Image (cartoon, rainbow, N blue to C red):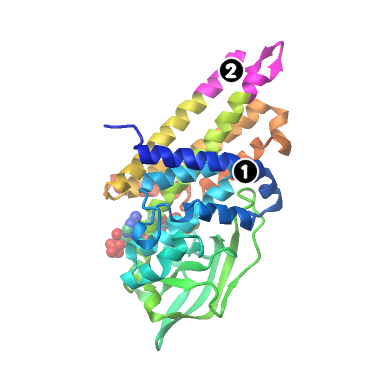
Amino acid sequence: MDFDLTEEQAMIRQMVREFAEKEVAPIAAEMDRLGEIPAELIGKIAEMGLFGISVPEAYGGGGGDFLSYILAVEELSRACASTGVTVETHVSLGTEPILNWGTEEQKQRYLPRLAGGEMIGSFGLTEPNAGSDAAAIETTAVPDGDHWLLNGSKIFISNSGLADLCIVMAMTDKTAGTRGISAFIVETASPGFSVGRQEEKMGIRAAKTASLTFDNVRVPRENLLGKIGEGFKIALHSLDGGRVAIAAQALGIAQSAFDQAREYARMRQQFNRPLSAFQAIQFILAEMATEIKAARMLTYHAAWLKDQGQRITEAAAMAKYYASETAMKQSSKAVQVYGGYGYIRENGVERLMRDAKITEIYEGTTEIQKIVVAGQLLR
Ligand code: COS
């Protein structure tokens, strides 16, 4: 058992940490206020190679392993959870499905541009009537000569408005249940593809989230991803990886909450002593640090299993369930340590609480993660 990062993983973590502290953290509050990640920052992330961190060098990526990517999402999210999820959506949900399920031709066509950040990726699964019940999607794809015709709509789609490409799940056979769903690589510039208004969210306010509408969108036949009927499997397999990355996002938020709470506890004086001299506050910090460590172990272990080529359905669900609850708890505790100063925007800890909540919801709610874990345990 080896708990050390490799030299390369440690180097990537350090590099992303420095980048996040210098380029992301100073503008995180402003991005949250404006509801926007500046194009300049997206450009810098692309320059750093973070959009292609886990894409093999043969396709223009950095050739890093999955754990390196997880470390990058954690460090970005520690500075700004909106930035973390923008990269996460692009990598786990917009790029990995092509890497894992695409034909050689699809990989050659899309991966170099995705890895370089010239194209941003997204993932269209959720619909108004298909949230946790992902198989209930109503968007349809019907063959039409050399194309597929897509009709329907999606909601709550991350990176909408920013993305150039969307992996869209659509029904190709309504009578076949989950095996009637297929996946398509859809370019967002296609006629009939439209993006709704950006949602006003509680947290991750700088990340883009909008609905999509497909009005007779013509998708070339060769853009079917995987085989007909494999879409649900592709979606859930992609979400396995995505859930580990959301656990990493949650970890970044929780770590930031701890860092700020500790700093404040040392600095803030009440009753002629720093807060950190009170056992009530020491216990809070001890609980925070312990739970964050446990969440980190689950998350890195799930990433390590993926790097060993093992199925991670259970490990990913456990990591996401635990890390997201940890982020919610720790960010709330950080606000408590700050007291009234934590409740006002100025100090930045309330943003962590708002950002943490979504990690318990997207890419499968906590309840869905428990269903997945129980399903594996009772198989
Ligand atoms: N990887 C690959 N394939 C998987 C899989 C995984 N992690 N999980 C399930 N599958 C396959 C199964 O093997 C099965 O395939 P076969 O029909 O060939 O046997 C198929 O998918 C259906 O599996 P299952 O019957 O377990 O699926 P359910 O309909 O019971 O749904 C839940 C399972 C509820 C867990 C699933 O719908 C889910 O994860 N929902 C949440 C969706 C979600 O995360 N939404 C967020 C949107 S993205 S922000």
As drawn, the label of residue 354 is 1
* Camera sees residue 228: yes
Residue 250 percent coordinates (x, y): 50, 42
Dominant SS in magenta: helix
Identify the amino acid type marked 2: Ala
Q: Mark 2 falls on what kind of element?
A: helix
**Residue at left 47%, top 47%?**
246
Label 1: state its secondary structure: helix
Quadrant location of the N terminus? top left
Residue farthest to the top, as pictured: 272
Would you say residue 96 sits in the magenta stretch?
no
Q: CA distance from mark 2 to mark 1?
A: 25 Å
Near-viewer residue (15 or 191) = 15
Judged left or right of residue 286, residue 25 is right
Residue type at numbered disc 1? Arg
- The answer to whether mark 1 is within 8 Å of ligand 1 is no
Horizontal and vertical percent position of residue 112:
42, 64
- In the image, residue 274 lies in the stretch drawn in magenta: yes
Q: Which one is nearer the viewer's eye here, 41 or 98?
A: 41
- The residue indicated by pointer 2 is 280
**Front one among 115 and 300:** 115
What residue do we see at 39% from left, 49% from top? 371
- Circle 1 packing at 10 Å, graded few (<14), some (14-19), many (20+), is some
Q: Quadrant of ligand 1?
A: bottom left
Q: Which residues are magenta?
A: 264-286
| Cβ atoms at labels 2 and 1 below 8 Å apart | no
Which label is found at residue 44? none
Rendered location of residue 43, percent (x, y):
57, 56
In the rendered view, tell whether residue 153 sits above or below residue 38.
Answer: below
Which of the 4 image quarters holds residue 232?
Answer: bottom left
